[in-house]
Amino acid sequence: MPLDATLVVPGLYLVLSYRVQKGTYHWLLVTTSDEVQPICFHAAQIPGWHYETKAWDMFRSQTSVIGIKIGKYISANELNTVLAPVPMTTPAEEGDVEFTCRIWVRAAIRHLNSLGMINCPNIDDLQAEANRLANMHAEDVALGRFGGVYVSSFSA
């Protein structure tokens, strides 16, 4: 089920979307305002890992589990300029782990934080918050109910 659009305010969102494998989610960033349609930024896997940005309505997507506001609205053009260079590889600070969409989002958030575009001093706390909230809503979404919309306690 989609996210409840009445709960969403303009901003930059971390969105976790439903996957069939329980406890795993597709991670993406979405910027939205009242004047423009939502645009997503993420690491897509087919064919091979690549950066993708496109119009994506988290309000209508049947797979949106949660949206967590992590910062103020940033235009899609500005975000694309900043996020397109984020590599499709596991950064050294992640250690020896396989590259995934989650790893890319973590790197993108670190990059946005380093530029002062958001304030997220601890990506691990944000990830734990996102996983906890997504796990609370995953079954509801699988049953066709609304996902959750939140403001992060760990990013602004």
Image (tube, rainbow, N blue to C red):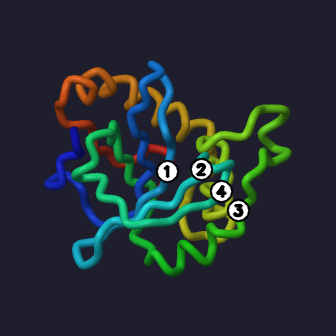
Q: Secondary structure at mark 2?
A: helix
- The one of 131 and 61 positioned closer to us in this rendering: 61
Lower position in the chain sequence, tag 2 or tag 4? 4
In whole angstroms, how far apart are the C-alphas of marks 1 and 4? 13 Å
Residue 28 disc label: 1
Q: Alpha carbon of mark 2 to alpha carbon of mark 3: how far?
A: 9 Å
Which is closer to the viewer, label 2 or label 4?
Answer: 4
The residue labelled by disc 4 is: 50
Q: Is residue 48 left or right of residue 7?
A: right
Query: Which is closer to the viewer, label 1 or label 4?
Result: 4
Q: Which residue in the protein does label 3 denote?
A: 86
Q: Amino acid at mark 3?
A: Val
Looking at the image, residue 93 sits to the left or right of residue 11; the answer is right
Q: Position of residue 35 (x, y in %)?
A: 24, 78
Q: Decide which of tag 3 and tag 1 comes sooner along the chain.
A: 1
Residue at the image point whose x is 85% and y is 45% from the top? 92
Q: Quadrant of the N terminus?
A: top left
Q: Amino acid at mark 1?
A: Leu
- The structure residue drawn at horizontal position 30% and vertical position 53%, both measured from the top left corner, is 58
Mark 2 = which residue? Answer: 105
**Sequence order check: which comes first, mark 2 or mark 3?**
3
Is mark 1 in CB contact (under 8 Å) with mark 2? yes
Residue 71 versus residue 107 in the image, above or below: below
Query: Which is nearer the N-term, disc 1 or disc 2?
Result: 1
Res 20 quadrant in image: top left
In the rendered structure, which amino acid carries the disc numbered 2? Val
Sequence-wise, which precedes: disc 4 or disc 3?
Answer: 4
Q: Mark 3 packing: few (<14 Cα in 10 Å), some, or many (20+)?
A: some
